[in-house]
Amino acid sequence: MADENSIKEALKSVKYPGFSRDIVSFGLVQEVAVEGKTARVNLSLTTGNPKIPTEIKQAVESTLSALDGIEDVECNIAVQAPKGATSAASGQQSAVKLPGIRRIIAVASGKGGVGKSTVATNLACAISQELSEKGSDGRVALLDCDIYGPSIPQMMGLHVRPEIENEKIIPPENFGIKVMSMALLVDADAPVVWRGPMINNAISQFAQHVNWGEIDTLVVDLPPGTGDAQLSLVQTFPVDAALIVTTPQKVAVDVTRRGARMFEKVSVPIIGICENMSYLEAPDGSRQHIFGEGGGLLTSKDLNAPLLAQIPLDSDVREGGDRGLPITISYPDSTAAKAFREMARSVMVRLESNNPMG
Ligand code: ADP
């Protein structure tokens, strides 16, 4: 006969639509009870797509009614819209409305220096290339929230002060991608003494005052780390999914895991893992694992999210960052650029199959 434990166990086989993770590990299950032959399940989730709760409800009902001794399933789902979400860190901050933006993907890492901004930049370029190759006129934008080291404008080759029109900031663009960063608004020499809440306020303020136009995908480069500042940024914007950047060292996995828990708390699905600086390709094609091996795969298993890319260590990647010419643009046929393109394709497919923004 089914009891609460076997019901919880069975719920672990119900996947979040479009993702390989289940609804239990996402933390959606609030309450489970059995009364006679009736199983009662209360779920809570954040989505703007009405199809998601319907699909989850159907899957829960068919999974549980197959259990021994269960004839009736009552599945209640409390749905919160992502745009109305409140911040757990501040307790009251509302999500910023970004009209015209179809979906948002956040790029995050447990610690700095793993290549998060490099990945965010090349992901944005690669998604834009994919869209135009498909004949879509969908646009991509890149928002730099890494206030401690805002490097996106540099990596995108942008050094202009944005124009202001009708009290809105016009994001400058390069390679067809609109870019916004505090680095474009403040002096490069100004000390960055802001901390958590001030950063979030500043970012939500300036993000709201940007005239983005119609954007298919906004890539958000989060500050490194797993603290309140990151948590509340994720809630400041209606983020659809998060991409986690890590390096091959096994020691990186712990830090990354903490970061991932942060997304769980706010029910933002992890779309996948990008392992950066994975190997160095020798002229004979052999691979040297300078920073060790296996971190990406271990993280992927640990978080139950796919390893979407292994980006090689390549001096052209670094030079591209320094010169403001991302490798996806300058050397599209390089191994690194191809890996970024492949990752962009997977991200797009996974975002589309979930399509939480409806
Ligand atoms: P983070 O945003 O995580 O702090 P960055 O993207 O700023 O990291 O990258 C740190 C440094 O490493 C930069 O100089 C960048 O050009 C370089 N870098 C990142 N990824 C690679 C790579 N795959 N190969 C070579 N250099 C890289």
Image (spheres, rainbow, N blue to C red):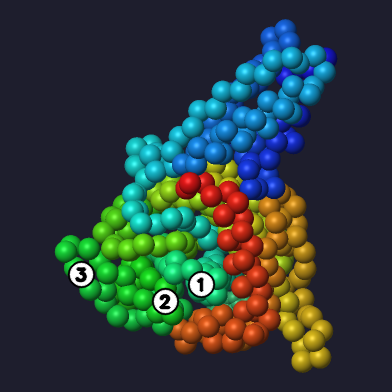
Could you give the CA–CA distance between mark 2 and mark 3, rounded to whole angstroms? 19 Å
Q: Residue at x 31, y 70 (%)?
A: 171
Disc 1 to disc 2: CB gap under 8 Å: no
Mark 3, secondary structure of its residue? strand
View extreme (left): residue: 166
Give the total number of marks visible in the rendering: 3
Q: Is mark 3 within 8 Å of ligand 1?
A: no
Q: Residue at x 63, y 43 (%)?
A: 17
Neighbor class of circle 3 (other Cα within 10 Å; few <14, some 14-19, many 20+) is: few
- Decide if residue 120 is in sight here: yes
As drawn, the label of residue 176 is: 2
As drawn, the label of residue 164 is: 3
The disc, 1 or 2, on the residue closer to the chain's N-terminal end is 1
View extreme (top): residue: 36
Could you give the CA–CA distance between mark 1 and mark 2, rounded to whole angstroms? 14 Å
**Image x and y of residue 197, in percent:** 35, 50
Could you give the CA–CA distance between mark 1 and mark 3, rounded to whole angstroms? 31 Å
The disc, 1 or 3, on the residue closer to the chain's N-terminal end is 1
Residue 316 horizontal side relative to residue 174, left or right: right
The disc, 2 or 3, on the residue closer to the chain's N-terminal end is 3
Residue 329 horizontal side relative to residue 296, left or right: left
**Image x and y of residue 240, in percent:** 51, 50
> Which amino acid lies under the numbered mark 2 shown in the image of this protein?
Gly
Neighbor class of circle 1 (other Cα within 10 Å; few <14, some 14-19, many 20+) is: few
Residue named by callout 1 = 135
Mark 1, secondary structure of its residue? loop
